[in-house]
Image (cartoon, rainbow, N blue to C red):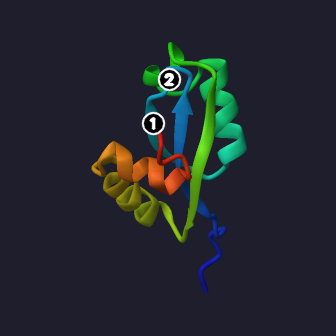
Amino acid sequence: MDLRKSTEWFCYILRCDDGTLYTGVTTDPARREREHNNGTAAKYTRTRRPVKIVYCETLRNRSDALRREHQLRHLPRNTKLELTGAADG
């Protein structure tokens, strides 16, 4: 019997204040958005605040989330914008 806690993982896309997009993974999207906005998360977002999560997917585990993050990071910008519902940029 596996007694480890089952934790959902999320892959997300942030829109930064300068219009750029940032992709990451977390177990708590709301907390992670706060961390980005407080400047305690990725270096990339520290100078591009405020940021807002514009896309978020739930995945089964960390491995799946990291795999999806890799896929999203390699998509063209216009495809990412279509995912977020902001296809016109």
Sequence-first tag of 1 and 2: 1
Residue at image x 45%, y 20%?
43
Disc 1 target residue: 22
Disc 2 target residue: 45
Vertical placement of residue 54 versus 60, above or below:
above
> Which residue type does callout 1 highlight?
Tyr
The part of the image, by quadrant, that contains residue 50 is top right
Callouts 1 and 2 close, C-beta under 8 Å: yes
Foreground of the two, 17 or 39 = 17
> Which residue type does callout 2 highlight?
Thr
Q: Position of residue 2 (x, y in %)?
A: 59, 80
Quarter of the image where the N terminus is located? bottom right
Residue at image x 53%, y 46%?
86
As measured in the structure, the alpha-carbon distance from the residue carrying label 1 to the one carrying label 2 is 8 Å
Q: Position of residue 15 (x, y in %)?
A: 54, 34
Residue at image x 47%, y 60%?
62
Mark drawn on residue 53: none
Label 1 sits on a secondary structure element that is strand
